[in-house]
Image (cartoon, rainbow, N blue to C red):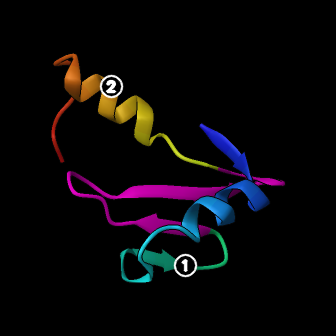
Amino acid sequence: MCLTAEALFLFLSILPPEIVELSDTRITVAAETRDAVWLAKGDEWCTSAPQIDAAVRLGRGEVL
């Protein structure tokens, strides 16, 4: 899943700041089950968190 920088930062603004770790090319959100890592890709920020969660729910992935 990818979002524009504006959309991602709007989403991040509603989260508690203590669960968000920022760097120039990576944003990590500490979630209850596992961290969601967002990576800068051109003009967007992308995460594979939804695919990882779906694989775990369907029994095709490992819980990290």
Residue in the picture at 25% in, 54% down: 34
In the rendered image, residue 56 lying in the magenta stretch gets the answer: no
User: Residue 52 sits in which quadrant?
Assistant: top left
Q: Main secondary structure of the magenta part?
A: strand
Find residue 33 and name its label: none
Sequence-wise, the earlier of marks 2 and 1 is 1
Q: Is residue 30 above or below residue 46?
A: below
Find residue 54 and name its label: 2
Residue in the picture at 48% in, 40% down: 48
From the image, which quarter does the N terminus lie in?
Answer: top right
Residue in the picture at 58% in, 71% down: 13
Q: Is residue 50 above or below residue 34?
A: above
* Mark 2–mark 1 CB contact (< 8 Å): no
Per the image, label 2 sits on a secondary structure element best described as helix
Q: Amino acid at mark 2?
A: Ala
Q: Amino acid at mark 1?
A: Leu
Seen from the viewer's position, the closer of residues 38 and 5 is: 5
Per the image, label 1 sits on a secondary structure element best described as strand
User: Residue 24 sits in which quadrant?
Assistant: bottom right
Give the alpha-carbon distance from disc 2 to disc 1, as whole Å. 25 Å
Q: Is residue 22 above or below residue 8?
A: below
Question: Which residue is at the far right?
Answer: 43
Q: How far across and how far down the image is residue 29, in percent?
A: 41, 65
Q: How far across and how far down the image is residue 50, in percent?
A: 43, 35
Q: Is residue 62 left or right of residue 5?
A: left
Q: To which residue does mark 1 refer?
A: 22
- The magenta-colored residue range is 26-45
